Image (cartoon, rainbow, N blue to C red):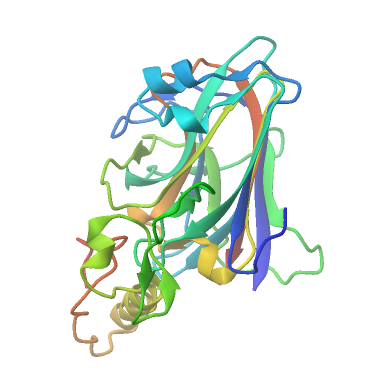
């Protein structure tokens, strides 16, 4: 159906251990728009914006606790919209968020898919793309753990500025 | 890098960055062989496990055979859970989505899946 891009201009990463509630504006969260909605992530890009060496142990991971009352990303912070301007709007667009009343917590379950995107935010970039639908990172619904995923920094990360986007398709 | 349609790609570009050293990765418990030091680029193929949906960065030096499910004819990762039985993630997602639709509409529910993808294990069937 329609491909969307959830993008944040700049945010400061913070090291979060698994199952720890993340603080606002230090992660990118994507939550399905309804209990039956499926979203397939096909691309993640992170560009470093730090002004000194800052190793980032970024992970795209599923959450054991979904963000509570997530607030859709504001225009001043980023965007979450269709890549094709001619796309017909869907009723419940997936929520791309950086703030929530209670932040999401990354799941620690070993069998849940997780993508490691380690890089240095001082001049480094990282990008993962999948071409085939079989290769996509899949989400279902809007509840933990399959319906809520975050792009966040793991323990050991040195806080630094990054900008990122997540391309996903609502099917 | 030439890719097959069934592969993904990961790029870590540290051409203009101090990069990440093997020691830094080792300190946080990550695989030191994945270090991309200053001035280097890592470009690797990825495959996604058909059973648990984990994205695997392929080690191009690997000589032993990769996981493969003869039942669903797809790549699977090295996680032992994925080798026990055929649990295609797409089948499980379709089932759970249909079940959620039926619950919302008040229709009769589908009978529970016998084997569920590790991605969705523990969720209401």
User: Farthest bottom residue?
Assistant: B108
Question: A61 or B8, which lies in front?
Answer: B8
Q: Is residue B57 above or below residue A90?
A: above
The image position of residue A12, as x and y in percent, is 57, 21
Q: Is residue B53 above or below residue A25?
A: below
| Horizontal arrangement in the rendering, residue A127 relative to residue A153 (left or right) | right
In which quadrant of the rendered view does residue A4 lie?
bottom right
Question: B72 or A109, which lies in front?
Answer: B72
Asked if residue B95 shows in the view, the reply is yes
User: Farthest top residue?
Assistant: A52
User: Farthest right residue?
Assistant: A86
In which quadrant of the rendered view does residue B18 lie?
top right
* Position of the C terminus of chain B by quadrant: bottom left
Q: Is residue A171 above or below residue A94?
A: below
Q: How many marks?
A: 0
Q: Residue at x 34, y 31 (%)?
A: A21
Q: Is residue B107 above or below residue B36?
A: below
| Horizontal arrangement in the rendering, residue B81 relative to residue B44 (left or right) | left
| Horizontal arrangement in the rendering, residue B75 relative to residue A132 (left or right) | left
Q: Residue at x 38, y 80 (%)?
A: B72
Asked if residue A153 shows in the view, the reply is no
The image position of residue B106, as x and y in percent, is 28, 85
Q: Residue at x 39, y 34 (%)?
A: A103
In which quadrant of the rendered view does residue A16 lie?
top left
The image position of residue A51, as x and y in percent, is 70, 11
Q: Residue at x 52, y 70 (%)?
A: A134
The image position of residue A73, as x and y in percent, is 60, 41
Question: B39 or B65, which lies in front?
Answer: B65
């Amino acid at each position: 159906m329609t491909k969307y891009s959830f993008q944040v201009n700049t945010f400061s990463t913070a090291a979060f251990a698994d199952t720890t509630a993340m603080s606002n504006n230090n992660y990118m969260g994507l939550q399905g728009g309804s209990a039956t909605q499926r979203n397939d992530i096909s691309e993640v890009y992170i560009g470093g914006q730090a002004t000194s060496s800052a190793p980032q142990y970024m992970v795209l991971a599923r959450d054991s606790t979904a963000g509570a009352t997530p607030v859709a990303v504001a225009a001043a912070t980023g965007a979450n919209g269709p890549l094709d301007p001619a796309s017909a709007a869907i009723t419940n667009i997936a929520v791309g968020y950086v703030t929530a009343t209670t932040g999401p917590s990354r799941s620690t379950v070993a069998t849940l898919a997780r993508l490691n995107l380690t890089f240095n935010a001082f001049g480094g970039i990282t990008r993962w793309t999948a071409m085939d639908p079989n290769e996509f990172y899949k989400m279902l619904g809007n509840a933990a753990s399959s319906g809520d995923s975050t792009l966040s920094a793991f323990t050991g990360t040195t806080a630094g500025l990054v900008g990122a986007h997540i391309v996903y398709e609502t099917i | 890098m030439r890719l097959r349609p069934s592969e993904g790609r990961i790029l870590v570009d540290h051409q203009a960055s101090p990069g990440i050293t093997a020691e830094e990765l080792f300190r946080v418990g990550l695989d030191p062989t994945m270090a991309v030091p200053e001035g280097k680029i890592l470009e690797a193929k990825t495959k996604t496990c058909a059973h648990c949906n984990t994205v695997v960065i392929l080690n191009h030096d690997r000589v032993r055979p990769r996981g493969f499910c003869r039942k669903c004819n797809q790549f699977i990762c090295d996680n032992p859970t994925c080798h026990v039985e055929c649990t295609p993630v797409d089948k499980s997602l379709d089932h759970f989505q249909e079940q959620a639709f039926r619950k919302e509409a008040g229709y009769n529910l589908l009978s529970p899946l016998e084997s569920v993808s590790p991605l969705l294990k523990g969720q209401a069937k």
